[in-house]
């Protein structure tokens, strides 16, 4: 019994003296700045109709959702859609972000980004909302999810419904 008691005391002391796992501190402010830079690069490439740069900013396994319910695309499909849209010189694709919110995950490995803008003259009266997920990869920040949405004012929804009858 005495040996067991001594063993328990020694084992307890050894376990108590083990270094504790220190929480890893993550510099979320720096990561948020990096995600903002990713989004500025995306905006610049979009306005320049630069499909190569846009494609380099998205992941191979990503999901990209257009405004049409059938537009759920992978990287190749979205790059093809960008190429086709930008080839139409009558299509005014430039926009300026009116609002951007970035919500970092606490571990600093991903972020949700929301942007709002008007796409004049494409939809001058209906704002757009871009929602995407940025992930930290070995090659820097990339987008692995994008969803483009038209966001009419609530009071305009009955008018839209009537127009679609």
Image: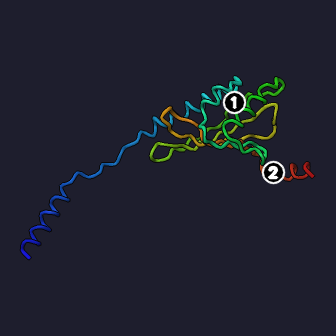
Q: Quadrant of the N terminus?
A: bottom left
| Image spot of residue 91 (x, y percent) | 81, 28
* Relative to 12, residue 92 above or below: above
* Relative to 29, residue 160 above or below: below
| Residue drawn at 45 percent across, 40 percent down | 28
> Residue 76: which disc?
none
For residue 89, side relative to residue 140 (left or right): right
Secondary-structure class at tag 2:
helix
* Relative to 38, residue 131 above or below: below
| Residue placed under numbered mark 1 in the picture | 96
* Relative to 29, residue 12 above or below: below
Marks 1 and 2, the one that precedes in the sequence: 1
| Image spot of residue 30 (x, y percent) | 45, 35
| Image spot of residue 22 (x, y percent) | 30, 48
| Residue placed under numbered mark 2 in the picture | 155
Closer to viewer: mark 1 or mark 2:
1
In three-dimensional space, the C-alpha distance between marks 1 and 2, rounded to whole angstroms, equals 24 Å
């Amino acid at each position: 019994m005495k040996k067991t008691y001594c063993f328990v005391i020694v084992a307890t002391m050894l376990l108590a003296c083990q270094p504790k796992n220190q929480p890893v501190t993550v510099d979320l402010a720096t990561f948020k700045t990096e995600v903002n830079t990713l989004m500025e690069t995306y905006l610049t490439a979009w306005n320049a109709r630069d499909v190569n740069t846009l494609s380099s900013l998205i992941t191979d396994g990503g999901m990209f959702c257009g405004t049409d319910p059938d537009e759920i695309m992978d990287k190749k499909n979205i790059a093809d859609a960008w190429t086709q849209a930008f080839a139409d010189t009558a299509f005014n694709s430039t926009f300026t972000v009116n609002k951007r919110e970035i919500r970092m995950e606490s571990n600093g490995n991903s972020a949700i980004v929301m942007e709002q803008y008007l796409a004049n003259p494409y939809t001058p009266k209906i704002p757009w909302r871009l929602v995407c997920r940025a992930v930290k990869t070995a090659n820097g920040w990339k987008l692995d999810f994008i969803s483009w949405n038209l966001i009419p004012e609530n009071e305009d929804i009955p008018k839209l419904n009537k127009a679609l009858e």
